[in-house]
């Protein structure tokens, strides 16, 4: 995952994609419910969003959301991140009703888990517009 993030930060998206997929394959070999799998799906979704591959981004972010809900519960940090990322995608596509549908729960989770002054709360508020 670290190699994927480093490549992503360098805008080397092809290398980032390969590294994230390697990380996801490794994460799925861990115990069912390992949050690393959800984090990796989020990273791949964000990568596709950066490449303007919105259909692929939505698919990976939606899978991250579903996996987080099923494995980690209704109020996990990973679910809040998946919802925030999905909402950010919807906002960028001007799908504001869908964005609000996922960002409101993300905001509530982040405020509860992290406190109202946390930077991740601010990120969700920015996605809400």
Image (cartoon, rainbow, N blue to C red):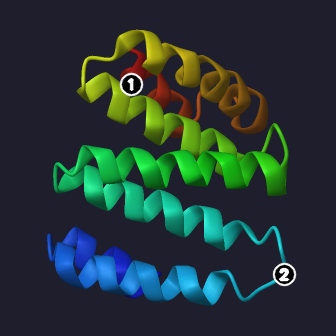
Residue denoted by label 1 = 127
Question: Which of the two residues, 129 or 92, is positioned nearer the viewer here?
Answer: 92
- SS of the residue at dot 1? helix
Estimate how packed mark 1 is, as few (under 14), some (14 to 19) or many (20 or more) residues with alpha carbons within 10 Å. many
The residue at 61%/24% (across/down) is 107
Q: Position of residue 125 (x, y in %)?
A: 46, 20
Numbered circle sitting on residue 69: none
Asked if residue 99 lies left or right of residue 108, the reply is left
Question: Which of the two residues, 91 or 118, is positioned nearer the viewer here?
Answer: 91
Asked if residue 66 lies left or right of residue 12, the reply is right
The residue at 42%/78% (across/down) is 20
| Cα–Cα span, label 2 and label 1 | 33 Å
Q: Position of residue 27 (x, y in %)?
A: 65, 82
First in sequence: mark 2 or mark 1? 2
Give the answer, above or below, for where 85 lies relative to 32: above
> To which quarter of the image does residue 99 belong?
top left
Numbered circle sitting on residue 31: 2
**Marks 2 & 1, CB-CB < 8 Å contact:** no
Asked if residue 5 lies left or right of residue 23, the reply is left
């Amino acid at each position: 995952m670290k190699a994927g993030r480093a490549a992503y930060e360098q805008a080397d998206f092809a290398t980032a994609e390969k590294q994230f997929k390697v990380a996801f394959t490794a994460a799925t070999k861990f115990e069912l419910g390992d949050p690393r799998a959800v984090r990796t799906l989020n990273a791949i979704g964000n990568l596709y969003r950066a490449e303007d591959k919105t259909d692929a981004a939505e698919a990976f972010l939606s899978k991250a959301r579903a996996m987080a809900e099923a494995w980690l519960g209704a109020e996990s940090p990973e679910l809040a991140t998946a919802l925030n990322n999905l909402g950010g995608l919807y906002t960028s596509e001007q799908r504001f009703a869908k964005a609000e549908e996922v960002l409101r729960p993300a905001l509530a989770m982040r405020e509860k888990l992290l406190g109202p002054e946390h930077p991740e709360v601010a990120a969700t508020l920015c996605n809400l517009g």
